[in-house]
Image: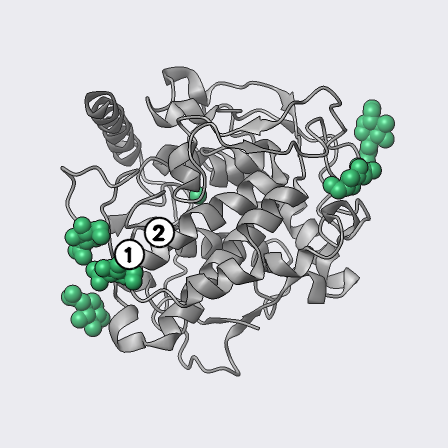
């Protein structure tokens, strides 16, 4: 098992080396510190349902604008990444086996969503508005298909996928078990979602995706060589209220924020993180290309918000606290991450170190969750 994984990592590492040696893509430099970062000057990241319908439409339009921009990958490198928005999912796929269930998970996703926020601002999203986030427990009183996120209205992120009547219960596979550990194990049965088919109503309906889908089993072997090739398929969802209720309820968030150390925080966050992905289903629950669904950035906004809140409870011990390595499931032969561990952002942005992304209100960042 370890040999297989090691092989997968070395294949990925050589892929990364190839990508890095290709002619440098002109990256925008977003890392300049804002001269004064205070509560007043910080970009405000707001809960989705607290935005006005006009503001929600601004997020949707800006994402559509990114989807209409050309891919930044050199021609022919990733044919399946047919636009700049999809580049986020393509880069996520390239780096996925380093930055999940690992010591770099929180740091990678903080910078990743910040790069999306910058890109949205370049696409007409108002510069004083930060990314929206998805505060899961606030969505448990009514079905998600009636919520501001997924009611299918022009200010939602589109509706559930079409109902696939024959879908059975959802059984946790061996490959998926680590993602929901320690709450569920392999073989655990979860009620099915309510969609499963193509999204045909609301924003992002009838989108043809060319990248993926990649089954969770590929976490054991790495992506096949032809993962970059176009595979046209429809954008699907499979909303699952039961999963959100089980994994992302207020009690679990409260316990998470009470975590006494980073190891315990990351461990509790694991199934909560996966919960949001499985709740939406479709590409959102694809380990490799989940950023294909614009819900990704709201979900990870909430993850980053909780990390920010947890760090702020005791900055002296928590700001630069890390645990784990820069490998999926913390491979024992890999070194522990530190302040100076580097994460690569490929065509999306500059490399950053974990130390540089530890504080949302200093250095390259100036944002706040409100
Ligand atoms: C909306 O979601 C609820 C709860 O999952 C489900 O029972 C219902 O069938 C869904 N409605 C539609 C129209 O899909
Ligand atoms: C999506 O396609 C279906 C089937 O062709 C069509 O009925 C539906 O109106 C389309 N939805 C949108 C929002 O264009
Ligand atoms: C972290 O907290 C957990 C839960 O209280 C505890 O079991 C564990 O020993 C702690 N680990 C470290 C490294 O302090
Ligand atoms: C990270 O946590 C694991 C599990 O508790 C522990 O074995 C390891 O020593 C920790 N590493 C550091 C650097 O704290
Ligand atoms: C990480 O960097 C911060 C800020 O430069 C510093 O305060 C902290 O001591 C560093 N931690 C380690 C373990 O070097
Ligand atoms: Cu991710």
Residue at horizontal 34%, vertical 43%?
101
Element type at mark 1:
helix
Q: Picture quarter containing residue 35?
A: bottom left
Q: Residue at x 74, y 35 (%)?
A: 205
Q: Quadrant of ligand 2?
A: top right
Looking at the image, residue 107 lies above or below residue 235: below
Q: Secondary structure under badge 2?
A: helix
Residue count near mark 1 (Cα–Cα under 10 Å), binned few <14, some 14–19, many ≥20: some
Q: Position of residue 8 (x, y in %)?
A: 27, 24
Does the beta carbon at disc 1 come under 8 Å from ligand 4? yes
Marks 1,2: beta carbons within 8 A: yes
Could you classify mark 2 by the number of other residues whose Cα lies within 10 Å: few (under 14), some (14-19), or many (20 or more)? some
Q: Is residue 125 left or right of residue 307?
A: right
Residue 263, label in figure = 1
Residue 134 seen in this snapshot? no
User: Is residue 310 shown left or right of residue 235?
Assistant: left
The mark found on residue 267 in the picture is: 2
Q: Can residue 128 be seen in this snapshot?
A: yes
Judging from the image, the colouring scheme is one colour
Rounded to the nearest angstrom, the CA distance separating label 1 from label 2 is 6 Å
Name the foreground residue: 14 vs 320.
320
């Amino acid at each position: 098992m370890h040999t297989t994984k090691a092989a997968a990592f070395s294949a990925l590492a050589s892929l990364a080396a190839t990508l890095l040696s290709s002619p440098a893509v002109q990256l925008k430099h977003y890392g300049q510190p804002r001269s004064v970062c205070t509560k007043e000057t910080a970009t405000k990241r707001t809960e989705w349902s607290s935005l006005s319908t006009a503001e929600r439409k601004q997020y949707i339009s800006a994402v559509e604008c990114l989807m209409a921009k050309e891919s930044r990958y050199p021609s022919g490198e990733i044919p399946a990444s047919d636009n700049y928005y999809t580049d986020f999912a393509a880069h996520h796929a390239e780096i996925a086996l380093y930055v999940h269930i690992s010591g770099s998970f929180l740091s990678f996703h903080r910078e990743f969503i910040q790069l999306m926020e910058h890109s949205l601002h370049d696409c007409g999203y108002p510069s004083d508005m930060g990314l929206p986030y998805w505060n899961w427990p606030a969505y448990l009183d009514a079905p998600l298909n009636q919520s501001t996120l997924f009611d299918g209205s022009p200010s939602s992120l589109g509706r559930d996928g079409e109902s696939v009547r024959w879908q059975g219960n959802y059984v946790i596979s061996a490959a998926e078990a680590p993602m929901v550990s320690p709450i569920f194990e392999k073989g655990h049965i979860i009620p099915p979602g309510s969609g499963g088919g193509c999204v045909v109503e609301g924003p992002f309906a009838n989108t043809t995706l060319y990248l993926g889908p990649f089954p969770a089993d590929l976490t054991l072997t790495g992506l096949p060589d032809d993962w970059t090739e176009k595979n046209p398929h429809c954008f699907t969802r499979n909303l699952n209220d039961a999963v959100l209720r089980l994994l992302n309820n207020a009690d679990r968030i409260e316990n998470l924020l009470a975590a006494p150390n980073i190891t315990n925080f990351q461990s509790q966050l694991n199934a909560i993180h996966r919960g949001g992905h499985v709740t939406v289903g479709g590409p959102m629950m694809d380990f490799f290309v989940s950023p294909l669904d614009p819900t990704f950035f709201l979900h990870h906004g909430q993850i980053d918000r909780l990390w920010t809140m947890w760090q702020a409870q005791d900055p002296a011990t928590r700001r630069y606290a890390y645990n784990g390595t820069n490998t999926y499931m913390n491979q024992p032969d890999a070194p522990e991450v530190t302040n100076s561990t580097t994460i690569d952002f490929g065509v999306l942005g500059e490399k950053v170190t974990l130390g540089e992304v530890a504080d949302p209100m200093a250095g390259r960042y100036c944002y706040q969750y409100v």
